[in-house]
Image (cartoon, helix red, strand yellow):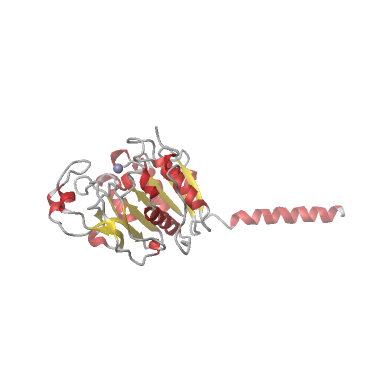
Amino acid sequence: MNKSFGTLLIVFFLLSWNIEPAAGGDHHGSGHLVLVAGGPSHSTGEHEHRAGVLLMERCLANVPGMEISTHFGGWPSDDGAFDDADAVHLFMDGGGGHPAIQDDRLQLLEDLIDDGVSLGAMHYAVEVPKDRGGEQFMDWIGGYYETHFSANPMWDPVFDNLSNHPIFIGVEPFSVHDEWYFSIRFREDQVGVTPLLVDAPSDDVREGPYVHPHGPYDHILERKGESEIVSWAVERKDGGRGFGFTGGHFHENWGDENFRKFVLNALVWLAGADIPANGVECAVTDADLEENLDE
Ligand SMILES: [Zn+2]
């Protein structure tokens, strides 16, 4: 090969190298899901944020079109962790200590949302203070757990009225004992909120005690016989999506095939990738459920 032809090849290679990265850089692709796990909490087997996120990661890693990033211990140390995310899913303790409301993170999330990024929140992560995150969560994912308005009893809803929403692909009716929060503070008239998992709590469940505070509350008792929403989806006007799921207290519930498939499907939907024809299939054994637990 003569020297100038070699140089030409190198120049051509460098040019094409430079062109590639310029094609990326906006958020309107699909499939990149950032999973954020809160720190240790509760007793072993409860609020297992790290083990839950590792399980979600393993189960989603091989779904075509999905790319998973994980962060543990509450919040990524570098905001760059969210670059190029299509969706962010939070599994962490909430309330006043919610990692997403500390420092300037609500603004960070607002900026992501403005870029069309989707947001999911699971179990305690759906609870934010009314005056710090409440309005944002209502806007971003459709609703939030509001202390003294929402309730958190342990109960066994039966989900046997599944809609044709894509998140239910391959999901059969199921029932799982969990701390299923309800009476979520939704947007007014539940505008844009698509109920997914719905059941009517028994009178006993409404009468309490709830896990904390023990209740009962009059407005919860007044709705005896009515159905309550414990998981929902939102499609925002900007194209971003939202997902709320109030179960997830007990790690062993990942062992229920339909509970698991429902959440995994929801995360694929959230990230804008295609849910597999039979839903996300992922074997989880009893031994798997003993892995990665907080001490
Ligand atoms: Zn809990």
Left or right of residue 221, residue 82 in this image = right
The residue drawn where x is 48% and y is 48% is: 57
State the residue in front, 284 or 201. 284
**Where does the image place residue 256, in percent across and percent down from the top left?**
38, 51
Where does ligand 1 appear, by image quarter? top left
| Residue under the image location 16 percent in, 44 percent down | 215
Of residues 97 and 194, the one drawn nearer to the viewer in this rendering? 194
Q: Give percent across and percent down for residue 139.
A: 32, 55
Counting from the top left corner in percent of width and height, residue 214 is at 18, 41
Quarter assignment of residue 288? top left
Residue at screen point 12% across, 50% down: 218
| Quarter occupied by residue 239 | bottom left
Task: Point out the image quarter for the C terminus.
Answer: top left
Q: Nearer the viewer, residue 246 or 253?
A: 253
- The answer to whether one can see residue 151 in this image is yes
Q: Residue furthest front?
A: 286
Q: Position of residue 38 (x, y in %)?
A: 39, 40
Picture layout, residue 11 above or below residue 291: below
